[in-house]
Amino acid sequence: MSSPARSAASVPDDLLDHLARTTALGPNEAARVVADVLAYFAESVEEYVRRRHGELQARGLTNDRIFERIGAELPHRRVRAPELSTRQLRRLVYG
């Protein structure tokens, strides 16, 4: 995943100015938020599955529930992921 600083460098200044004018965010905060959003959407399917697995596991969900949930979330990502079976999801997490 790209770093927020690297992503912020590619954000047009007029977008950052617009966000600073239309929100309570300062210019540096606006740059950080945009960089975080860009990094979120730049995640590969594998990175997303691993990250979500860790988040849901930390909430105490079992793997069966985790993989069911991740499988349901993937089609709603900005760039549609291929449909993955539970076995494929497990392999992404555990190798």
Image (cartoon, helix red, strand yellow):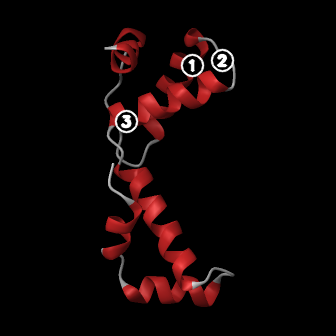
Q: CA distance from mark 2 to mark 1?
A: 6 Å
Q: Locate the C terminus by quadrant.
A: top left
Label 3 or label 1, whichever comes before in sequence order: 3
Give SS at disc 2.
loop
Residue drawn at the location 57% of the way across and 75% of the way down: 29
Label 2 or label 1, whichever comes before in sequence order: 2
Q: Amino acid at mark 1?
A: Ile
Q: Tell whether label 1 touches label 2 (CB within 8 Å).
A: yes
Answer with the quarter of the image where residue 82 lies. top left
Label 2 or label 3, whichever comes before in sequence order: 3
Answer with the quarter of the image where residue 2 lies. bottom left
Residue drawn at the location 43% of the way across and 65% of the way down: 35
Residue 49: % across, % down:
43, 29
Q: Quick check: 44 above or below 88? A: below
Name the mark nearer the viewer: 3 or 1: 3
Q: Amino acid at mark 3?
A: Glu
> Closest to the observer: 5 or 89?
5
How busy is the neighbourhood of tag 3: few (under 14 within 10 Å), some, or many (20 plus)? some
Q: Tell whether label 3 touches label 2 (CB within 8 Å).
A: no
- Say which residue label 3 marks: 47
Residue 70: % across, % down:
50, 26
- Side of 40 where 2 appears, left or right: left
Residue 14: % across, % down:
42, 89
- Say which residue label 1 marks: 66
Give SS at disc 1.
helix
Q: CA distance from mark 3 to mark 1?
A: 15 Å
Residue drawn at the location 51% of the way across and 32% of the way down: 52
- Say which residue label 2 marks: 61
How busy is the neighbourhood of tag 2: few (under 14 within 10 Å), some, or many (20 plus)? some
Residue drawn at the location 47% of the way across and 60% of the way down: 37
Q: Quick check: 93 above or below 39? A: above
